[in-house]
Image (cartoon, rainbow, N blue to C red):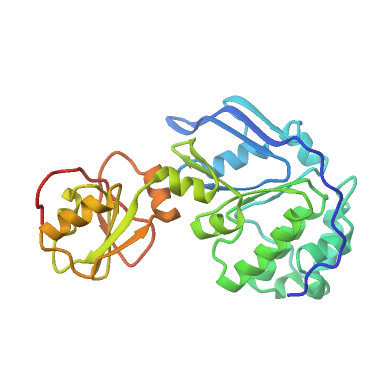
Amino acid sequence: MTPSVLPPRAPRQAGTAVDLAAVRKSYGDVHAVRGLDLAVDRGETVALLGPNGAGKSTTIALMLGLLAQDGGDVSLLGRAPEEAVRAGLVGAMPQEGGLIPRVTVRELLSFVRGTYPAPMPLGEVLDVARLTALADRRVDKLSGGQAQRVRFALALCGDPELIVLDEPTAALDVTARRELWQAMAAYAARGNTLLFSTHYLEEADEYARRIVVISRGTVVADGSGAELKKRAGGRRVSVDLDGREPGAFRRVPGVTGVEVRGARVHLTTDDADLTVTALAQGGALRHVEVTGGGLDEAFVALTRSETGDVRSGAGGVRSGTGGTHAGSVL
């Protein structure tokens, strides 16, 4: 991928790009957003994480003025969301949205740029979105990853200081995700603010300097990936399952989460020494491995419900809570 040759822009004005204070939104009896507070400084790259139904998409819709909040205040760059969007200060890349067929990338971007009072020069839009070589290709002839970069380019057309993206890399393959992130990183490097939601924990850890975790419509954690891992605490102890019932491991001292992957059981623990000792006393110490907790474990610890649950599968974030009991349990 050829790097951008355009000079960096002058630093953007300091201050707050996103400010949500005690924001509430309900759909009947369903409270999607519950008194949510969130402030994002200009120039930050922030990831929103949360399980399905946590309120991420509703929060983004409120942020962009697509929904009216039931209570609280929302402002973008010191303005009402609708005003900031109309002025071209804010760009958005929704989770879904079709592109006009039978036009070229250049024609589509030129049309959209014409709707803004002070658009980004077309050459810059194409360069930042990594689309220069595709400018004269028809939109309906693009691959999925290329089409997603066009959607990102559309968000750039107004020369925004802030871009908000809802699951921008969902359903993309690894290569397409990397190419889109190169484009988004180029935008952020110019002093702009980038806020995105994602289900890819490693993506948030790699590209966002700050991660905000939302659960049940409110912020439950806020910090860097390293800070969230530290806050959640705990380590992971992995041993062979050896035919034992996964639920039995919940009673091992120190264990707070149980996950089965194939023939191995992975235990999240807040006291690795205590857990390993108990496993050894129970004769279960076969091929033991102790590692530091990752962002997956932190995410589960920060968002899990009070009800314990043990699940098995090939991967993903799956966990359950457990108690602490003395003595051999296996």
Q: Nearer the viewer, residue 313 or 105?
A: 313
* Residue under the point 35% across and 60% down: 291
**Position in image of residue 6 (x %, y %):** 87, 63
**Position in image of residue 18 (x %, y %):** 68, 37
Q: Name above or below for residue 74 compared with residue 122.
A: above
Left or right: residue 28 compared with residue 195 = left
Is residue 107 shown to the viewer in this render? yes
Q: Name above or below for residue 25 compared with residue 118.
A: above
Is residue 66 shown to the viewer in this render? no
Specify the farthest residue to the top.
71
Q: Name above or below for residue 296 compared with residue 150.
A: above
Q: Nearer the viewer, residue 117 or 51?
A: 51
Q: Give the quadrant of residue 125.
A: bottom right
**Position in image of residue 134 (x %, y %):** 79, 74
Left or right: residue 268 compared with residue 146 = left
Which quarter of the image is occupied by the N terminus?
A: bottom right
* Residue under the point 76% across and 49% down: 192
